[in-house]
Amino acid sequence: MTKQEDNKAVVVRWFTDFWGETCDLSVVDDIAAPDMLLKYSLHEPRHGRDDIKAFMTDFRAAFPDLNFWATADLIAEGDYAVGQWEGGGTHTGPAFSDFLVGSLPAATGRTMRFTGTTVLKVVDGRIVEEIGLDDGVAALTQLGLIKAA
């Protein structure tokens, strides 16, 4: 396999096992670099395996049906892979305070569904960066944290 095919395989596993319908946090130790950066517009940047696992544990507790899936083929070049996705979930769990613009009280019952594009850097089979641009305005509007114009 080429480097790009190897990197795509790592990213597909990450998208499936970390961001997919069920989350297996052992994937973080398996394929995330120890100092991995996870950065999206909705949340504070996360650094390192423990911080990333804590983020996902809290996110999935608040949104138990959280799920993201690919909407286009991955594109890979050099150390980078780019993916488009869609996803979301319903807030039926505990209060959630990880959004940059505000917090949700427990079990609001609100559903968010939004899209995004993510660029991942993979070095020696490990993800060192995941930087995403998401439609946070849609998600935050659906959750009632910002008002529609």
Image: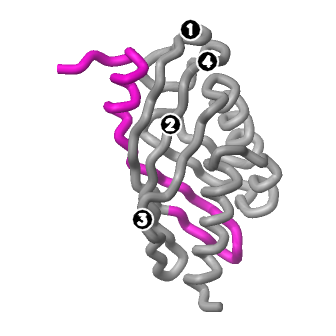
Colouring scheme applied when the structure was drawn = one colour
Q: Which of the two labelled residues, at mark 2 and mark 3, occupies the earlier sequence position?
A: 3
Q: Is residue 15 above or below residue 80?
A: above
The three-letter code of the residue at mark 3 reads: Ala
Label at residue 72: 3
What are the residue bounds of the magenta stretch? 120-149
The three-letter code of the residue at mark 4 reads: Thr
Q: Nearer the viewer, mark 1 or mark 3?
A: 3
| Rendered residue at 53%/53% (across/down) | 69
Side of 80 relative to 2 (left or right): left
Label 2 and label 3: CA atoms lie apart by 17 Å
Q: Which element carries disc 1, helix, strand or loop?
A: loop
Q: Which of the two labelled residues, at mark 1 and mark 4, occupies the earlier sequence position?
A: 4
Q: Which element carries disc 3, helix, strand or loop?
A: loop
- Residue with the mark numbered 2: 88
Label 4 and label 3: CA atoms lie apart by 29 Å
How packed mark 2 is, by other alpha carbons closer than 10 Å (few <14, some 14-19, many 20 or more), is some
Q: Which of the two labelled residues, at mark 1 and mark 2, occupies the earlier sequence position?
A: 2
How packed mark 4 is, by other alpha carbons closer than 10 Å (few <14, some 14-19, many 20 or more), is some
Question: Which quadrant is the N terminus positioned in?
Answer: bottom right
The three-letter code of the residue at mark 2 reads: Gly
